[in-house]
Image (spheres, coloured by chain):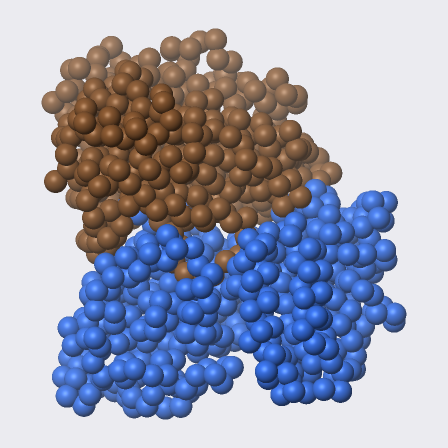
Chain colours: A blue, B brown
């Protein structure tokens, strides 16, 4: 059993740390973006070094006080706030935000956990290189949180998830030991993969304090096209065709449905939509070419092949940077339109690519059988990642669907599971989906996870209640 | 403590399995390629299904009998044979060799652990796709072993290690539970990364029975060049330059030293060497282009840029497939030449890319101070992976250096550690390097590894003595 943080513990811990390291936690450490959880008033520790993190975690472990690691606070599943149970210490990495080094000739950057993602991107750019992780909250999320949650974002198709961008970690384990795993090696087969175990464990197995991350050459030419396609299956065929033409230069492949475009027109009419008649299905294809190839030529080639095979109905290639931005705005502003409409249930699911079309059809049928709803389905098709969001019928409010919410969620979860999908593609488990994990997680995996958690964190101090309850 | 396999246990287990599943282990299960270890006579189980693997492992766990998973038997660190201690059961996956499915439209293949790597490659090729893992033993190694050891090989620069090629696993955990983790998902953030924990754990945490693996479009044009370069540092600059020109189409970047070329000339004079005057440093650059770009043009561009920057001294671009093979033969036959010369110590190390040049210089100085030796240093420069092999002076035999062997090994290990490198880049730990891991492994990582091992395999049945002693 954990103990609540108390004045005596705070006082003892303060005496071991520089003045000002521990402070009362103001509201920003207790809130989370979706407003579902509110943390308990308490204290936040703001260490400036790995050694200080180690002192803090070791003290908490000894006193059996919970530790909630805190990055930018942008997580969407409540992993960053502990709303009940014994009061934990919040451990913010915000002061450990240095870019320790850019090894440009190795394509490696070493960043501390509290470094804001955008600062990591900019440090790479200063050396003419690319750190490809890119997501909506990049101006405020910390790279440590990106790693702890294995963040996804816009460039996964080409560069992988955050996990794939990490070469090495420095971390403090639940007993306070510092793991110096900050390697810049591309190959290292010397024991268990502790790096990937910590990545995606959402602070429940230790605190990431720094990381060695991969950098890449920056593409020299960019190209963007919008294609209307007859179906999600056609979109998948178009994706494969694009990769045969442009290989790894395909950076993004986003699918949108007419309902999303209607939401845009309804709530954000200033967003310019290139197709006057809203298409049933729309694909945004983005290329970033390294070398001298002409993006427009590649996109034209894809368009012609796609027309010939009947997987493209119409297409537009952005002629300049302004048009590229306009095309991207269609995709990027759909979440904002969704917010204005107000979803009953929103989902961040992934599916095997060839199951997506069936999933959408079946899901639509099942949900429409439950009530009069609108479905907006869009997402990173190239990653099999679908935002499958359910909205009230036109003129109705989400509150009128309160009774249906749980049933809708269950229908979606069951269908995802039956197709071999995941109920959380990029957002993680946190506190919001800990029960869902118990229901849909593989039994052997869950038992292994519990064994691992108990072995590395026998007192259960790390982010109590997150991932595993 | 483990118990030795005995007749009573074998009899009981046989009664639960189809006839013929358990057989006396003939020599091929007891030998390993380097001849350093010889397994104890005993029995081999050859299950045909995951369920049978589960029965076997559960029975061994209950009786506390060790289990040594066995794939193609090609590992180079003794991970596949248990030379002493209580006699274990050998668990060969050879009968579980099915390609269960090729999801061509998803770029995914599902293969059982016993499938020979070459058969996986061919199943992908039949669908016009590429499974890029490629290594010397591909005709006999099993994909399960490749995963268990996180094999590297020729295409790591472009496609990553085996770990990077795996989407999902099916495995039997040490208590016999079957983990159904055979997902085809590109994104799935629902709990700890058990997949990567098992990959590279060398059979010490469970038995991989099947895997979902990534496939890729096949390159449409190939191009190969040999460049002479003034130094390893220049080679590194050439690598970065190549990637700016050809991006992800750079498939291989191999560094060779004059000593290796001399060994070839001495022991395999039939290998055609394109440069009459053997260069001090030689780079082989391989491109595999997706799309319509001309490889020769790209290679010429790289050559010209390299000359201008002074990182290339001379170069040859293969004009046809025969020449490509000739160029590759220079690189691929060096290990055979090495064998004929007979090394005192051979190493499979990796280093941060920018440390390679210093490592080679310092290593050479330190080794030459120990005695009259020849150093052949070559490898996958793009991965920071160096084979740093020490040979007798001309006219001397390796036996004359027996007294020096340990000292040479220690000098290399110490230098690797001091440069932030790894003593095992691709071969793993097995039994050969378990002690080295204890010496050079990070203390916190080792303690976490031991905790994880104890939690998942409390009786220590899985591959006893491998990785952790």
Q: Position of residue A176 (x, y in %)?
A: 20, 67
Q: Quadrant of the N terminus of chain B?
A: top left
- Tell which residue pokes out farthest to the right in this image: A277
Q: What residue is shown at x 70% (from left), y 66% (from top)? A: A364
Q: Position of residue A95 (x, y in %)?
A: 34, 77
- Tell which residue pokes out farthest to the front in this image: B15
User: In this view of the protein, can residue B1 be seen by the observer?
Assistant: yes
Q: What residue is shown at x 33% (from left), y 67% (from top)? A: A204
Q: Is residue A25 above or below residue B304?
A: below
Q: What residue is shown at x 51% (from left), y 82% (from top)? A: A34
Residue B121 position by quadrant: top right
Q: Quadrant of the C terminus of chain B?
A: top left
Q: Is residue B209 left or right of residue B404?
A: right
Q: Is residue B300 left or right of residue A7?
A: right
* Of B348 and B351, the residue lying toward us: B348
Q: Position of residue B133 (x, y in %)?
A: 50, 34
**What is the tally of numbered marks visible in this picture?**
0
Residue B68 position by quadrant: top left
* Of A4 and B233, the residue lying toward us: A4
Q: What residue is shown at x 53% (from left), y 26% (from top)? A: B119
Q: Is residue A354 left or right of residue A93?
A: right
User: In this view of the protein, can residue B152 be seen by the observer?
Assistant: no
Q: Is residue B258 above or below residue A385?
A: above
Q: Is residue B90 above or below residue A447?
A: above
* Of B198 and A413, the residue lying toward us: A413
Q: Is residue A398 above or below residue B424?
A: below
Q: Position of residue B91 (x, y in %)?
A: 32, 30
């Amino acid at each position: 059993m954990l103990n609540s943080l108390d004045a005596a513990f705070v006082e003892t811990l303060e005496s071991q740390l520089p003045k000002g390291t521990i402070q009362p936690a103001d509201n920003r450490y207790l809130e989370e973006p979706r407003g579902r959880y509110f943390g308990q008033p308490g204290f936040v520790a703001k260490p400036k070094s790995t050694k200080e993190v180690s002192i803090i975690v070791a003290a908490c472990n000894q006193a059996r006080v919970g530790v909630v690691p805190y990055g930018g606070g942008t997580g969407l599943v409540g992993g960053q706030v502990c709303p009940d149970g014994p009061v934990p210490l919040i451990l913010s990495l915000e002061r450990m935000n240095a870019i320790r080094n850019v090894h440009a000739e190795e394509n490696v950057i070493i960043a501390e956990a509290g470094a804001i993602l955008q600062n990591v991107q900019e440090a790479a750019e200063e050396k003419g290189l690319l750190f490809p992780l890119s997501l909506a909250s990049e101006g405020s999320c910390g790279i440590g949180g990106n790693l702890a949650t294995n963040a996804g974002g816009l460039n996964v198709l080409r560069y992988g998830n955050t996990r794939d961008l990490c070469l090495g970690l420095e971390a403090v384990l639940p007993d306070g030991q510092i793991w110096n795993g900050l390697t810049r090696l591309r190959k290292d087969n010397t024991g268990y993969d502790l790096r990937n175990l910590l990545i995606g464990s959402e602070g429940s197995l230790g605190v990431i304090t720094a990381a060695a991350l991969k950098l890449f050459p920056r593409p020299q030419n960019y190209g963007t096209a919008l294609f209307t396609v007859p179906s999600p299956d056609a979109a998948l065929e178009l994706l494969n065709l694009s990769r045969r033409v442009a290989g790894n230069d395909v950076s993004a492949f986003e699918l949108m449905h007419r309902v999303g475009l209607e939401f845009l027109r309804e709530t954000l009419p200033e967003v310019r939509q290139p197709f006057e008649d809203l298409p049933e299905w729309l694909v945004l294809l983005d290329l970033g070419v390294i070398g001298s190839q002409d993006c427009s030529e590649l996109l034209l080639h894809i368009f012609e092949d796609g027309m010939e095979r009947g997987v493209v109905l119409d297409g537009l290639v952005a002629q300049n940077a302004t048009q590229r931005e306009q095309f991207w705005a269609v995709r990027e502003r759909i979440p904002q339109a969704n917010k204005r409409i107000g979803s009953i249930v929103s989902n961040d699911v992934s599916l095997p690519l060839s199951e997506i079309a069936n999933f959408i059809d079946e899901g639509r049928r099942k949900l429409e059988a439950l009530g009069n709803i609108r479905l907006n389905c869009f997402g990173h098709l190239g990653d099999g990642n679908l935002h499958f969001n359910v909205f009230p019928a036109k003129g109705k409010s989400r509150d009128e669907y309160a009774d249906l919410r749980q049933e809708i969620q269950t229908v979606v979860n069951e269908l995802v599971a039956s197709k071999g999908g995941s109920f959380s593609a990029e957002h993680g488990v946190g506190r919001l989906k800990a029960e869902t994990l118990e229901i849909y997680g593989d039994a052997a995996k869950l038992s292994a996870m519990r064994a691992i958690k108990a072995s590395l964190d026998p007192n259960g101090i790390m982010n109590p209640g997150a991932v595993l309850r």
